């Protein structure tokens, strides 16, 4: 990278800085450099069999990504990316395996506001920051999409500092989000219906969509639920800690249901329509759709008020 000072009419020379100086500089200017991430701490110590050779480790910077709801491991190299990838991978796997401990340490030892642990993904992102990366590492990171982000930096005389996102630039996501907002506003002006992620999930399953809206509006009376639309389900998380997985059905199949609601609340003996315990005695939870234990199948609109009343009886 070259940086020209037109005012001084010269190329600015790169500075040789230590990893500690780089870490301190990033932390001091965090809000300007990484506005999309929540800073937790520098030099986050990991105790245990962290590295592949059985030693402890220390994360250069630990952060949190509110957009993906994941912890972020940031590793620094003052020069090239030699060994930085393997080191960060060790740290990522250790945090994923010891998520509860890391979450509590982040809350108790550092002044950071995080969502409830149940609302944070157990997956961990990695950001690697170095002066240069090999082309194979760049291609590998781009294939892994959100898992690994590569940032090239340059530090120059006269106080100039450069960050270059080689992939996953947050500004790209902001630009896309703004484009989608503009498109929705244009649809409103033109009198066209606004298509949301929830609408796209249900598609032509209008009865499933209608029953979902009734259920969502019930939950919203106690505080707006957090909505996460995925390819196979919609995740609803309430302010009081309840979670539901909503799955659209055609009204056909084994239970002939229009809506499947997965929940950790046990209604197997309190409602007179189909509820299935996904855990058999001595066996693992069946199926991969949602983490909740029980499946409730809503086959018609009359069953939904009964289900809602059962929830109210359990949680007040």
Image: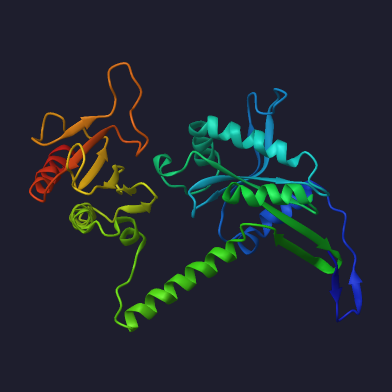
Work out whether residue 40 or residue 251 is closer to the camera in this orientation and state it. 251
Residue 201 position, x and y percent, is 33, 56
Q: Is residue 126 visible?
A: yes
Residue 128 position, x and y percent, is 70, 48
Which quadrant does the C terminus fall into?
top left
Residue 65 position, x and y percent, is 53, 51
| Residue at far front of view | 253
Residue 223 position, x and y percent, is 26, 55
Which quadrant does the N terminus fall into?
bottom right
Left or right: 285, with 271 as reference point: right
Question: Which of the 4 image quarters holds residue 126?
Answer: top right
Is residue 11 positioned above or below 199 on the image?
below
Is residue 119 positioned above or below 52 on the image?
below
Residue lying at 40% horizontally and 40% vertically, measured from the top left: 118
Question: Which of the 4 image quarters holds residue 298?
Answer: top left
Residue lying at 44% horizontally and 70% vertically, measured from the top left: 180
Residue lying at 63% horizontally and 24% vertically, measured from the top left: 48
Mark count: 0
Is residue 316 positioned above or below 190 on the image?
above
Work out whether residue 130 or residue 302 is closer to the camera in this orientation and state it. 302
């Amino acid at each position: 990278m070259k940086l020209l000072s037109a005012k001084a009419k010269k190329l600015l020379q790169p500075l040789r800085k230590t990893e500690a100086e780089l870490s301190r500089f990033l932390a001091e200017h965090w809000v300007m450099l990484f506005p999309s991430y929540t800073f937790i701490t520098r030099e986050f110590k990991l105790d245990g069999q962290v590295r592949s050779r059985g030693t402890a480790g220390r994360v250069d910077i630990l952060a949190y990504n509110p957009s993906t709801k994941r912890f972020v491991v940031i590793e620094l190299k003052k020069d090239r990316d030699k060994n930085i990838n393997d080191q960060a991978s060790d740290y990522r796997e250790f945090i994923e395996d010891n998520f509860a401990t890391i979450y509590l340490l982040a809350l108790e030892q550092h002044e950071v506001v995080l969502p409830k642990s149940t609302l944070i993904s157990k997956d961990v992102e990695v950001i690697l920051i170095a002066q240069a990366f090999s082309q194979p590492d760049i291609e590998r990171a781009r294939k892994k999409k959100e898992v690994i982000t590569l940032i090239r930096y340059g530090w120059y005389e006269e106080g100039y500092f450069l960050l270059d996102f080689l992939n996953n630039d947050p500004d790209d996501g902001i630009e896309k989000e703004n484009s989608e907002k503009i498109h929705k506003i244009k649809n409103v002006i033109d009198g066209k219906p606004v298509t949301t992620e929830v609408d796209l999930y249900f598609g032509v399953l209008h009865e499933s969509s209608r029953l979902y809206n009734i259920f969502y509006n019930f939950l919203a009376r106690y505080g707006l639920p957090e909505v996460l639309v995925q390819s196979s389900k919609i995740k609803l998380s309430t302010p009081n800690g309840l979670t539901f997985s909503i799955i659209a059905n055609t009204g056909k199949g084994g239970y002939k249901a229009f809506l499947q609601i997965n929940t950790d609340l046990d209604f197997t003996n309190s409602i007179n329509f189909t509820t299935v315990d996904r855990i058999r005695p001595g066996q693992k939870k069946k199926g991969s759709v949602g983490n909740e234990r029980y499946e409730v199948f809503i086959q018609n609109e009359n069953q939904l008020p009964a289900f809602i009343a059962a929830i109210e009886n359990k949680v007040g």
